[in-house]
Amino acid sequence: MELIIASFDDLLAYENDNNELWSMICAAMYKDIHLFKGTLDYWGCGQNRIEDELFHITKKIRLFEHAL
């Protein structure tokens, strides 16, 4: 899952958002969300709010906070 998230972050850096692909990633993560807590914590950047220090995918990852 870490490789998938990293690859999607790269995609966001160079292309427009791909909602269909993101939906498939979300579905895969929700199945076993507890297994990906460390990954979501890392890519969610904790409490950091400085825009230049976030990943491209951070805002999307933070949407999972309620599920953990």
Image: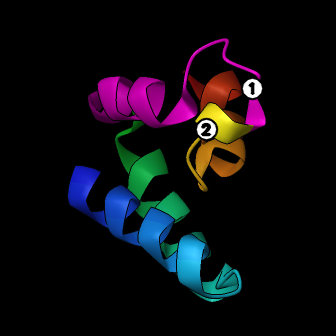
* Residue lying farthest to the top in this orientation: 47
Asked whether residue 62 is drawn in magenta, I would say no
Residue 4 in the image: above or below residue 37: below
Residue 27 in the image: above or below residue 58: below
Task: Residue under label 2, please give it.
Answer: 54
Count of marks placed on residues: 2
Residue 61 is situated, as x and y percent measured from the top left of the image, at 60, 43
Type of colouring: rainbow
Q: For residue 44, which quarter of the picture?
A: top right
Mark on residue 5? none
Question: Can you see residue 33?
Answer: yes
Residue 1 is situated, as x and y percent measured from the top left of the image, at 26, 54
Residue 18 in the image: above or below residue 58: below
Circle 2 Cα neighbour tier, 10 Å, few/some/many (<14 / 14–19 / ≥20): some
Find the distance from the CA under tag 2 to the CA under tag 1: 7 Å
Task: Residue under label 1, please give it.
Answer: 50
User: Residue at 32% of width from left, 24% of height from top?
Assistant: 38
| 50 to the left or right of 5 | right
Residue 36 or residue 43, whichever sits in front = 43
Q: Tell me which amino acid carries mark 2.
A: Leu
Residue 11 or residue 38, whichever sits in front = 11
Screen quadrant of the C terminus:
top right
Main secondary-structure element of the magenta-colored stretch: helix
Q: Tell me which amino acid carries mark 1.
A: Ile
Residue interval drawn in magenta: 34-51
SS state under label 2: loop
| 5 to the left or right of 2 | right
* Residue lying farthest to the front in this orientation: 52
